[in-house]
Image (cartoon, rainbow, N blue to C red):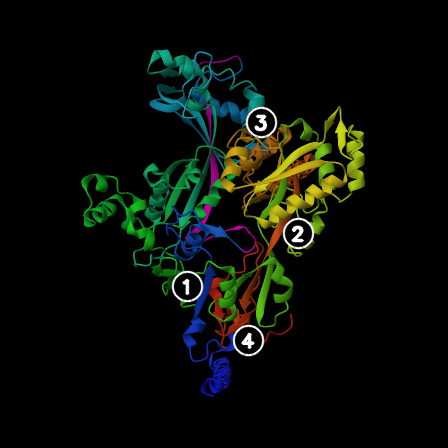
């Protein structure tokens, strides 16, 4: 009887407890009830922990999210993806161009350096636009200098000698007797500056320059080897873009120390110090010299034309007083390290990397590995303190747990999975944002293979694929077609280029015209060979795996025999992509906002372990790629990028597929606070800016205690 009663009573009690819990535990809408502190804290869930909280050393997204709130750079991108000042108040760009003068008179050229200025002024009278860009001209006297360079060792046949699959290197030391130079200071950077001048001094001016008279190897036996580097050592024509930053005054690091140009110089030097092994080094390699002009002014001169260089100054600035050589040595000594450990102690070993101090809107407070990172509001932030008093990044590895934490109000946002979008977009409790990202997926063809050398073949393969159906059924409509190599949301992308139409009948007709005919088994055949190849991708990506199956079936319908394989990422890269041993592959690129595509598409980057692994070669594309990275006028860049887009879309080295959308949910009570001139506050709905970022105005976000009512429009 007792057991029977227990079996009846216990379920009733359990139901009662659950009912009580339902009313006792705050719902999502009432999560701040009895806990007002929750309204001033933003909690974000991420799948991976941060690794190193140093702007010049980190290389992962989680670390980058924290670094971006603790540190600040000289500039960044505004809501329209244009550069805007941050720690820099302003900046100017101009150019210093140099023409090395010949050692003696030639038939039609001045015989003495001092005659060159008047000579050019007279000869270029008919080019007022060219002359108007010249701020000044001056003669730089001759000088002697010693130098050295690392070059590959060559065998007797002139081939590069390798050790452990890497070129064996040697040091060449030399003396350069630099002839006088004519220095032009230009108002604007102009990659074509020397072109009109060459019409006057001779198009072969550089080619006939007597380098051997001015460059001598320290070891005479190396002179022959040195010859191939003459033009690098002695630049007859040289472009040196100049970038000068005027810095904000009154900015302080989180420890109260004033920010100035010394911190900027120190950050640059720390990046370029090989002992620190910064992954950012290549962004600053083009810098020729750095000079502090004043407490709030710094000048950078570049070795060559490279317009993307300015974007590097979005890098967070480090505090010199906390990380200079003397401070690092004291830290090493305080750790009671050995003499050799103290000697080898670098920025990478410093406790700063887990206790960062920057100038950003949030101050680092606490980091518990694999649990959370906590930041608090910087009350002294130069732009005014953020609305949130605290930011917490919680590490939650499981997507389902992230979702449940969001529903429970323990996290403030959630990245929705594609199959959930249709359902959650209609949920009235949340704000939702679906934005186009910076990445795209594609099918790349190895153009070295005879099968793929015809653009018409590649076009036909693309026409056989119904990309719209892939977007609909694989991405749940959370994607858009792309047609070219730039991020779709940037100005570089040509919106007028239309996607290749889905037309399998036309695809087959094109292949028939090229000599491919179906055999009795239904496969396309030409000269006794089947139209057959392998399509591969990496494991762990369900979308790419689905693409494999869909395109295999689509090509089968027109008679193309496609075999598919999936490989673990490391094997995929090493054995197939980097070694160029593949037919076709499914991959994607995550693009930036810069238009420089040199590494991905220039023909010089088509070797093993390089990024143009499909082997695309087009002289006109090469010309445009180089011109784009040397152009400092955005309007001209846009003209050239869209021309390049059309060219690559015509050649179809890739079948461009789609860019995915990112859908995120956010608590509906979070708003943007805009302060009016009269001191009153206005609440504005959160919205994504041009780059798709919904957190662009994060410092103005506030969580209200109830859902606001916005007036229409």
C-alpha span from label 3 to label 4: 65 Å
Q: In the displayed structure, would residue 388 be above or below residue 338?
A: below
Looking at the picture, tell me which residue is in the foreground, 27 or 391.
Answer: 27
In the depicted structure, whether residue 681 falls above or below residue 507: below
Q: Position of residue 553 (x, y in %)?
A: 71, 43
Q: Distance between the residues labelled 2 and 1?
A: 33 Å
Q: Which of 627 and 67 is in front in this view?
A: 67
Write down the region rendered in magenta: 79-107
Quick check: 358 left or right of 342?
A: right
* 85 drawn magenta: yes
10 Å crowding of disc 3: few (<14), some (14-19), many (20+): few
The local secondary structure at tag 2 comes to strand
Residue 267 placement: quadrant:
top left
Q: Can residue 204 be seen in this view?
A: yes
Q: Name the residue under label 2.
A: 480
Q: Which of marks 4 and 1 is nearer the N terminus?
A: 1
Residue at the far front in the pictured view:
1
Residue holding disc 3: 196
Q: What element carries label 1?
A: strand
Q: Give the residue at mark 4.
A: 707
Between disc 4 and disc 2, whose residue precedes?
2
| Contact flag, marks 4 and 2 (Cβ < 8 Å) | no
Q: Which of marks 2 and 1 is nearer the N terminus?
A: 1
- Is residue 180 visible from the viewing direction of this image? no
Give the residue number, with chain letter if any, for mark 1: 392
Q: Which of marks 3 and 2 is nearer the N terminus?
A: 3
Query: Between 173 and 354, which is closer to the camera in this rendering?
Result: 354
337 with respect to 377 (left or right) = left
């Amino acid at each position: 009887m007792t057991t029977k009663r227990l079996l009846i009573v216990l379920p009733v009690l359990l139901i009662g407890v659950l009912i009580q819990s339902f009313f006792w535990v705050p719902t999502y809408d009432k999560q701040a009830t009895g806990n007002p502190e929750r309204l001033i804290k933003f909690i974000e869930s991420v799948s991976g922990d941060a690794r190193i909280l140093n702007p010049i050393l980190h290389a992962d997204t989680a670390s980058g999210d924290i670094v971006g709130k603790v540190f600040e750079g000289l500039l960044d991108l505004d809501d329209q993806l244009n550069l805007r000042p941050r720690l820099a108040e302003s900046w100017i760009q101009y150019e210093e161009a140099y023409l090395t003068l010949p050692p003696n008179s030639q038939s039609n050229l001045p015989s003495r350096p001092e005659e060159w200025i008047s000579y050019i002024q007279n000869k270029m009278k008919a080019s007022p636009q060219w002359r108007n860009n010249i701020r000044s001209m001056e003669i730089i006297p001759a000088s002697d200098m010693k130098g050295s360079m690392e070059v590959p060792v060559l065998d007797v046949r002139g081939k590069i000698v390798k050790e452990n699959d890497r070129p064996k290197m040697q040091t060449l030391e030399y003396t350069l007797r630099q002839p006088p130079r004519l220095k032009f200071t230009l108002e604007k950077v102009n990659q074509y500056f020397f072109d009109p001048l060459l019409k006057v001094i001779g198009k072969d001016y550089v080619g006939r320059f007597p380098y051997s008279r001015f460059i001598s190897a320290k070891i005479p036996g190396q002179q022959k080897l040195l010859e191939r580097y003459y033009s690098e050592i002695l630049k007859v024509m040289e472009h040196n873009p100049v970038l000068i930053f005027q810095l904000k005054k009154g900015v302080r690091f989180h420890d109260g120390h004033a920010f100035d140009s010394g911190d900027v110089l120190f950050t640059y030097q720390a990046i370029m110090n090989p002992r620190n092994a910064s992954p950012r080094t290549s962004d600053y390699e083009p810098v020729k010299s750095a000079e502090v002009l004043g407490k709030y002014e710094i000048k950078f001169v570049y070795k060559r034309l490279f317009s993307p260089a300015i974007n590097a100054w979005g890098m967070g600035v480090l505090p010199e007083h906390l990380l200079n050589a003397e401070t690092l040595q004291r830290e090493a000594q305080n750790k009671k390290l050995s003499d050799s450990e103290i000697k080898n102690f670098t920025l990478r070993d410093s406790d700063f990397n887990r206790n960062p101090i920057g100038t950003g809107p949030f101050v680092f407070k606490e980091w518990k590995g694999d649990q959370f990172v906590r930041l608090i509001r910087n009350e002294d932030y130069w732009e005014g303190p953020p609305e949130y008093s605290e930011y917490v990044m919680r590490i939650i590895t499981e997507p389902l747990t992230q979702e449940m934490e969001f529903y429970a109000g323990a996290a403030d946002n959630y990245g929705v999975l594609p199959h959930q979008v249709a359902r959650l977009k209609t949920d009235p409790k949340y704000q939702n944002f679906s934005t186009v990202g910076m990445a795209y997926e594609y099918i790349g063809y190895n153009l070295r293979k005879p099968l793929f050398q015809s653009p018409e073949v590649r076009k036909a393969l693309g026409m056989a694929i119904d990309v719209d159906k892939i977007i609909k059924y694989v991405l749940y409509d959370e994607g858009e077609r792309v047609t070219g190599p730039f991020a779709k949301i940037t100005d570089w992308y040509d919106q007028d280029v239309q996607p290749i139409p889905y037309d399998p009948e036309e695809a087959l007709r094109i292949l028939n015209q090229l000599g491919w005919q179906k055999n009795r088994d239904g496969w396309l055949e030409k000269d006794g060979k089947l139209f057959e190849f392998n399509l591969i991708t990496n494991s762990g990506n369900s979308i790419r795996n689905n693409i494999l199956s869909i395109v295999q079936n689509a090509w089968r319908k027109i008679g193309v025999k496609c075999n598919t394989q999936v490989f673990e990422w490391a094997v995929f890269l090493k054995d197939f992509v980097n070694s160029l041993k593949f037919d076709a592959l499914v991959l994607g690129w995550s693009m930036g906002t810069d238009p420089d595509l040199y590494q991905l598409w220039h023909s010089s980057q088509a070797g093993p372990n390089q990024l143009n692994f499909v082997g695309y070669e087009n002289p006109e594309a090469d010309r445009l790629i180089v011109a784009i990275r040397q152009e400092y006028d955005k309007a001209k860049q846009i003209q050239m990028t869209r021309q390049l887009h059309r060219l690559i879309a015509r050649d179809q080295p890739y079948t461009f597929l789609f860019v995915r959308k990112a859908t995120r949910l956010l608590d509906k009570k979070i708003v943007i606070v805009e302060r009016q001139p009269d001191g009153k506050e206005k609440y504005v709905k959160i919205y994504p800016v041009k780059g798709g970022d919904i957190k662009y105005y994060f410092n103005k976000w506030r969580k209200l205690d109830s859902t606001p009512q916005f007036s229409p429009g």
